[in-house]
Amino acid sequence: MTKSRNLHFIYAIADVIICFLVTTISFVSFYGVSGFKDNIISSFIYAGSISLATLIVFFILKIYKIITTQISILDAVKIIFVTLGIHVTGLIVITVVPQLPRFTDFVFAWLLSTGFLIFSHVSIRVAVRVFNMASVVGSKTNKVRTLVIGAGATGKVVIDESRRNPHNHNKIIVMVDDDPNKIGGLFSNIPIKGPIKDIAKIIDYTKAQEVIIAMSKISQDRLHEIINLLNSCNVRVRRMPLIEEMQGPNDKRIIDVDLNDLLSRDPVILDNHEVKDMLHEKCVMVTGAGGSIGSELVRQIFKTHPKTLILFDIYENSTYDIQMELTRKIREEKIKDIQLVTLIGSTYNETRVEQIIKKYKPDYIYHAAAYKHVPLMEDSPAEAIRTNVIGTYNVAKMADKYGVKKMVLVSTDKAVRPTNVMGATKRFAETIIQYYSEKSKNTAYAAVRFGNVLGSNGSVVPLFKKQIEAGGPVTVTDKRIIRYFMTIPEAVSLILQCGLYAKGGEIFILDMGQPVKILDLAEKLIRQAGFVPYIDIQIEEIGLRPGEKLFEELLIDIDHQQKTENKRIYIEDKEAINSNLESDVLEASKAFDMAETSDVKTLLKHLIKTYKDKGDKDE
C-alpha cells in the first residue's frame, strides 16, 4: 500500500512539473523569446493555473489510481479527454473573463500546449507498461512455444497473461479459429490461422509445444472433439474454464485438462434432488467408507443432512481422513443436526456387523466394502470370498433382521460373465442381494453395476501419474485394451439415485457411452503433465495381468433391459433366484481352509456357473 501511495505522489509531482514546463515552453516556442517576454506574466499565471487544475481534477477523477503497468486503451482515452477538458475550460475562462490578462494569438499557443500535454500525460504512463512488458519478455529464458485456440475475448486474456506475468512461461506464437473473417488476420499482433480441424498441421508447421484452449462458451461435446484432434500431436494441452465451471466473473485460470475431459464424453449429471428428500434426517450407513467410492458416498450423503451418518471400514487411516474432513465441515459450517459415527471393523465379522446395525438401526445401507483389485484377488481368492461374499451376506442378513429400509450393493461390470476372482465374487454378492430381495419383507435390496472409475484407488490414472512423476516409462498391459470409464462423482450419483429407484432385487446399470482406449488415456495424461509421449516419456506394453480381459463387454442391451426414469440408467433382466444360496454361502466358507488358490477357484466355478478364468476359454 505504501509503494502504491509513493507512486501516486510521484505521478502527481511529475504532472505538475510537466504541465508547467510544457505550457511555458509551448508559449516560448510559439511566440519566440522576445514575444514571450511580452506575455511572460500571463503565461506563468496560465501555466500555474493549468498545473493546479490538472492536479485537482486528476485526483478527483482517480487518474492516479490507474495501475500504469496494466494501463489500457480505455485508461489512455480517459486521460486524453480529462486533459482536453481541463484545457478547454481554461480557454473558455480566458476568453469570457475580461479581467484576465490577454495573450497575442492565444489560440495557437493553446493548441500547441494542449497537444504536448495530452501526449506527455499519456506517454509517461504507457512507457511504464512498455518497460514492464519488455522486462517480462526479457526475463523468459525458457519460453514455451504456445498455440491458442480461440481468437476472442478469452484468447485475449491468455495473451495478456503471457505478456504481463513474469512467471508465465508461454510465448504465444499463433492463434487458431474457425471464423473465416479472422483467419489470416492479426490478433494483438499474433497471426490467426485456421480452421481448427487443421490444428495438427498448424502445430507441425509452427513447432508449437503447448496448446491452450481459450473458448469458454463451447459445449462439452465440442471441447472433447478438439481434445481428440490433439491426440496425435506431441503437445501439452491446457484450457480456460468453461462458463459453467467459472468460480466468479473474473475467473481467468488456465487449467489442465481434467478427468471429465479424459472421458471424451459429457459427464453424466443425475438429478439427486429426490435423493436428498429420501435421506434427509435419516440414519444412513456406508460400509467401506474410507475407500474411493465409499468416501465420495459419505460426502454426497452428508450434503443431504442425514440425522446420523455411520462410517464403517476396516482400514483406519483413510477412514480417519474422511472423518476429519467432515468434522471440519461441521465445525466451519456450524452444523448441529448431523451425528457423525465412525466405526472400525470388518463386514465379514458377523457379530460386529450385527452390533452396529442393532444399535443404530440405519434406514439405509450403502455397501461399498469390497476387495476390487483384480490381479491381487487372483493370488488371494479366499480373501475375496471372505470380504465380497461373506461380508455382503452378513450385511444383507442383518439389514433384513433389523428392518433396514433399503440396502444398495456397489457391484461391477466385471460381474458379467466373469473371467477373474474379483468379478466372480461380486457376481456371487449380486445373487445374495437378489435372494434377500425375495426373502425379506422389510428391506428393498438392489445392486449397482458400473465400469472402471477414473481416479479411484488402484485405477490406471493414479498409476500413470506416479509413473510420469518418476520419469516413466508408463506401462499399459496391452495397446489394444479398452475400458468403459466414469468419474467417482458420476458413480456415486448413480448409486444414490438407484437407491431411490430400488423396489427390490434390481441390478442397475449405467449407460457409460463409448469406451476409452487405455493407450490414448496414457498419452493424454503425459501431455497434460507437460511432456511429449514417446520422446520425454516412453509407453511400454507389459502384457495382460492375471484375470484381465482385453475387451470388456458393453453392459447396455436396450432391446432387453428395462429403462428407468433416467435415460442413462437401465435395469438388468432378473434371473432365477438361487434357492440354495444359504448352503452355497456355507460351502464358499470352505475356501478359508484351502491352501491352493486353484482349489478356491474351482470352488468358485462350481458356485458361479458363468465364471470361467482365462484357462477355460479363449479371450
Image (cartoon, grey):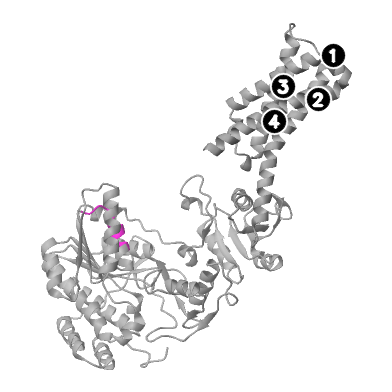
- Would you say residue 303 is visible in this rendering? no
- Asked whether, in this view, residue 428 is left or right of residue 460, the answer is left
Which residue is under mark 3?
87
Residue in view at x 53 percent, y 63 percent: 224
Which residue is under mark 1?
38
**Secondary structure found at label 2:** helix
The part of the image, by quadrant, that contains residue 380 is bottom left
Alpha carbon distance from label 1 to label 3: 22 Å
- Sequence-wise, the earlier of marks 4 and 2 is 2
Q: Nearer the viewer, mark 1 or mark 4?
A: 1
Which residue is under mark 4?
80
Q: 425 or 68, which is in the foreground? A: 68
- Sequence-wise, the earlier of marks 1 and 4 is 1
- Classed neighbour count for the residue bearing mark 4: other residues with Cα under 10 Å, few (<14), some (14–19), many (≥20): some
Any mark on residue 26, and which? 2
Alpha carbon distance from label 1 to label 4: 31 Å
Alpha carbon distance from label 1 to label 2: 15 Å
Amino acid tagged 3:
His
- Sequence-wise, the earlier of marks 2 and 3 is 2
Q: 605 or 104, which is in the foreground? A: 104
- Sequence-wise, the earlier of marks 4 and 3 is 4
Q: Nearer the viewer, mark 1 or mark 2?
A: 1
Residue in view at x 35 percent, y 85 percent: 419
Tag 2 and tag 3, C-beta contact below 8 Å:
no
The magenta span reads: 296-306
